[in-house]
Image (cartoon, helix red, strand yellow):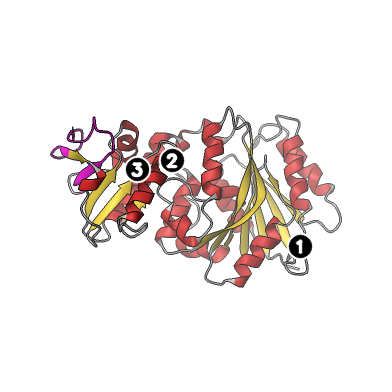
Amino acid sequence: MNPRISVLLPVYNAAADGGTALRRCLQSLFAQCGTPEAPLPPTEIIALDDGSTDASGAVLDALALLRPQGAPELRVCHLPHAGIAPTLNAGLELARGPYIARMDADDVSHPRRLSLQYARLAADPDMGVCAACATFGGDPETAFGFAHFVDWQNSLLTPEDIRDGRFRDAPVCHPTVMFRREIAEREGPYRDGDFAEDWELWLRWLDAGVRFCKLPQALYQWNDPPQRLTRTDNRYSDAANNALRAFWLRRECRRKPVRLYVWGAGRMARRRLAPLWDATLLPVAFIDIDPRKIGQYVRNLPGPPVPVIAPQNLPPAAEDALLLNALTAHGAAEQAAAWLEAHGWRRGVHWLLT
């Protein structure tokens, strides 16, 4: 029977611990099950060995032979080393199912993860991508930034939340997603470049109108190993993220003529948006609550100095006004959002989180 779900599992040198984490990952996929209300359809796991130089390939081959009876089929594909985006695209070519799920080799899926995501997509033909909430599988003391990021992602559940959060950071956890294969065929698969391949994909698909949702259950353990790509690859650096954000944010800002405002005159906010500005796209003013900044000017833009004003000097919300909420200090963006909403500035219409 042809599978309905194809799970793409890229693997590269994942056996540093003797293959323990990789085995745990596959066992969580072998244990996928459903209920009468949300049965698990036929499922295949495509393990994509991206030219590993350790024992990862051998571990995968052994697990394919030891697969429990009744568990999803495991197909092991040994590929030349090419990196994450080409490897995932090779998996898309090999996949037989109309629904594509993702998984990372050092993480763990809840037994009902796939059945619940499939049920959600099957119930709504207009929904293109279904993610799930995740638990942080690291030390929140030493990796506070990543733990906070997981919490932020988990707060974005509805299509509107995910759409409106897309410029702040990747609004869904990549290895938790399930999506319709036809979307990748229509809007394009993963792209390989100097950027995070998952965030670029989400920005491109959301720009095309693809609807995303997220299940509120924590169905995935997102671990934080030292070799995680976001720690070791420059494509996930702040500079790369700022450039990617600017590319898609510029496209959004130019959908119609707007007067642009930026809430956040501090160094961090200005650095995040620095790649956005050019001679044809500049802010009218920066907004800040720090009395030391109010009345000053931001001078390092490719145009005349831009004034820093207090929130109460912001003009009323209007169709031709767009504000970028670029605050990054803990809780600051939320406080600014509350002020904007209370004064008639609507999220996703008059202001964007960046």
Residue situated in front as seen by the camera: 65 or 22: 22
**Residue occupying image coordinates x 65% and y 36%:** 52
2 vs 1, front mark: 2
Residue situated in front as seen by the camera: 9 or 62: 9
Residues packed near mark 2 inside 10 Å, few (<14), some (14 to 19) or many (20 plus): few
* Secondary element type, mark 2: loop
Secondary structure mostly taken by the magenta-highlighted segment of the chain: loop
| Residue on which disc 3 sits | 326
* Secondary element type, mark 3: loop
Q: For the magenta stretch, what is the residue range? A: 281-306
For marks 3 and 2 on the same chain, the one whose residue lies earlier in the sequence: 3
Is 299 magenta? The answer is: yes
Mark 2 to mark 1 CA distance (whole Å) = 39 Å
Which quadrant of the rendered structure holds the N terminus? bottom right
Question: Which amino acid, mark 3?
Answer: Ala
**Residue occupying image coordinates x 72% and y 40%:** 22
Marks 2 and 3: in contact by CB < 8 Å? no
Question: Which amino acid, mark 1?
Answer: Gly
Question: Which amino acid, mark 2?
Answer: Gly
| Residue on which disc 1 sits | 34
Q: Position of residue 173 (x, y in %)?
A: 56, 48
Q: Residue furthest left?
A: 304
Mark 3 to mark 2 CA distance (whole Å) = 12 Å
In the displayed structure, would residue 343 be above or below residue 295? Answer: below
